[in-house]
Amino acid sequence: EFLNDASIAHLDLRPDNVMWRAVGGESDAAVEMKLIDFDDAALFDHPIPQEFVSYVVDTRDYRYPFQEGDEESEQLAAALHNQFFLDAAELWLQSEVDHFTDFMWDRGQHILRTLKEKGGRSLACSEPFRHVAGSLVEDWDTVATMPLNERSDSSAI
């Protein structure tokens, strides 16, 4: 939320760029988080460098929120870009896939298409989100309410 409040699209918001550490005592479950690698960040409503979008599309790097055709017109940074990464990370944490990059190669474009169809609104807890997760989520209600540290692969972040 703070990225959106600051009108910043990170554009590379993946687990490798989220640093965290426990703070407080053992009984305290507080976590301090820091985002790193703002090299590709852009202010909302500002153009994303065409070279960057073209490279992502040409190399079919599905970790990023761009799809074929985006390289043909100016892309403006928006909250949708941050939401893409948040929804992708949420789905990945509920999957059995060990590495985020592997998950994104398989699901990235579908997540992006579904998010764009919903006008950039979060897919979390929606029917399209459950559909994207598909067989990855056996018991949605249990996973949706489960503390993050009990979800599969949460230690990899």
Image (cartoon, grey):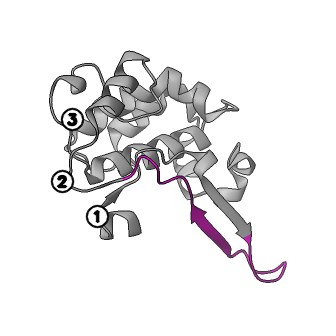
Contact (Cβ within 8 Å) of mark 3 with mark 1: no
What mark, if any, has residue 45 been given in the picture? 2
* Label 1 CA crowd tier, 10 Å (few <14, some 14–19, many 20+): some
Amino acid type of the residue tagged 2 in the rendering: Asp
Indicate the quadrant containing the N terminus: top left, top right, bottom left or bottom right. Answer: bottom left
Q: Secondary structure at mark 3?
A: helix
Q: Give residue 75's position: percent from left, percent from top.
A: 21, 38
Image side of residue 142 versus residue 120, left or right: right
Q: Is residue 108 on the magenta stretch?
A: no
What mark, if any, has residue 7 been given in the picture? 1
Give the spatial CA distance, label 3 vs label 2. 20 Å
Q: Give residue 34's position: percent from left, percent from top.
A: 59, 65
Contact (Cβ within 8 Å) of mark 3 with mark 2: no
Image side of residue 133 versus residue 78, left or right: right
Q: Residue at x 47, y 54 (%)?
A: 38
Magenta region's main secondary structure? loop
Give the magenta part as a residue range: 22-41
Q: Is residue 34 on the magenta stretch?
A: yes
Q: Secondary structure at mark 1?
A: loop
Q: Which residue is mark 3?
A: 117
Give the spatial CA distance, label 2 vs label 1. 9 Å
Q: Nearer the viewer, residue 57 or 132?
A: 57
Q: Residue at x 23, y 27 (%)?
A: 70
Amino acid type of the residue tagged 1 in the rendering: Ser
* For residue 95, above or below residue 125: above
Which is more N-terminal, label 1 or label 3? 1
Q: Give residue 105's position: percent from left, percent from top.
A: 52, 22
Which is more N-terminal, label 2 or label 3? 2
* For residue 51, above or below residue 118: above
Contact (Cβ within 8 Å) of mark 2 with mark 1: yes
